[in-house]
Amino acid sequence: MLDFIKLPLEAVALGLPVSDEFLQKYAPVLAGILAQLIFTIIFERRLHEKFLFQVIVTVVALLAAVSMTAYILWYPVVLANGDVLAIFFLFMLAWGIFFHLLAYHFGHSLLNSVFGPGWVKGIDYLYLAGSFYGVYRLILGFTNRDTSIHNVWLPLMLAVALSLRFTKTSVEIFKWDLEPTRR
């Protein structure tokens, strides 16, 4: 039944096998993230200038990322090597969507006023700290076959760190930290 999901996830997992248990447990999570992404893309073009839409779409992305992260951390399933890469992909997708929406809609108006105009450069510190922790866990040996919350911290930290780094790049390229009239 879930074969149409397995092939793309195994492609994301660089050809490594993704366990059936993983697919059964996290298929709804992936469906929720994709539904949220499709909704955002469809309505973003028409409603992106409306403040209420900006708030709703960003809050929904945050709730999707946080709830997906909590679900995966509380009910981890890591049985095959491909499961770790698939979890990494899910984290990257969910947190990347949230960070991009936050920067795009509120980069200039909110983040500049709260953190100052250097907030874009400050993302590097979060990125480096998260990457350090993820690589640190990798070096210490991420070969434990026991399924626990600790097995999914590595992909979570690396995914959040890389999502922040991609967001920083997007902010700098598209100048989301400037007033919309100056972009």
Image (cartoon, rainbow, N blue to C red):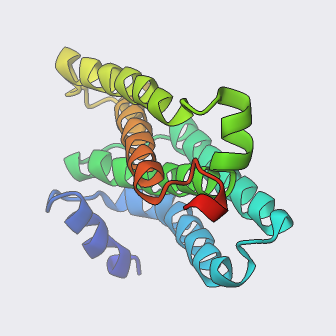
Placement of the N terminus among the 4 image quadrants? bottom left
Q: Report whether residue 147 is seen.
A: no
Q: Residue at x 85, y 65 (%)?
A: 52
Q: Is residue 30 above or below residue 162?
A: below
Q: Is residue 182 left or right of residue 136?
A: right
Q: Residue at x 66, y 28 (%)?
A: 115
Q: Is residue 145 above or below residue 175?
A: above
In the displayed orientation, state which residue is furthest to the right: 52
Placement of the C terminus among the 4 image quadrants? bottom right
Q: Report whether residue 155 is seen.
A: yes
Q: Is residue 145 left or right of residue 166?
A: left
Q: Residue at x 39, y 20 (%)?
A: 129
Quick one: 161 or 18, which is closer to the camera?
A: 161
Q: In the picture, residue 145 is in which quadrant?
A: top left
In the displayed orientation, state which residue is furthest to the front: 182
Q: Is residue 27 above or below residue 136?
A: below
Q: Position of residue 12 (x, y in %)?
A: 25, 62
Quick one: 80 or 131, which is closer to the camera?
A: 131
Q: Position of residue 158 (x, y in %)?
A: 35, 35
Q: Residue at x 64, y 29 (%)?
A: 116
Quick one: 76 or 47, which is closer to the camera?
A: 47
Q: Position of residue 138 (x, y in %)?
A: 22, 24
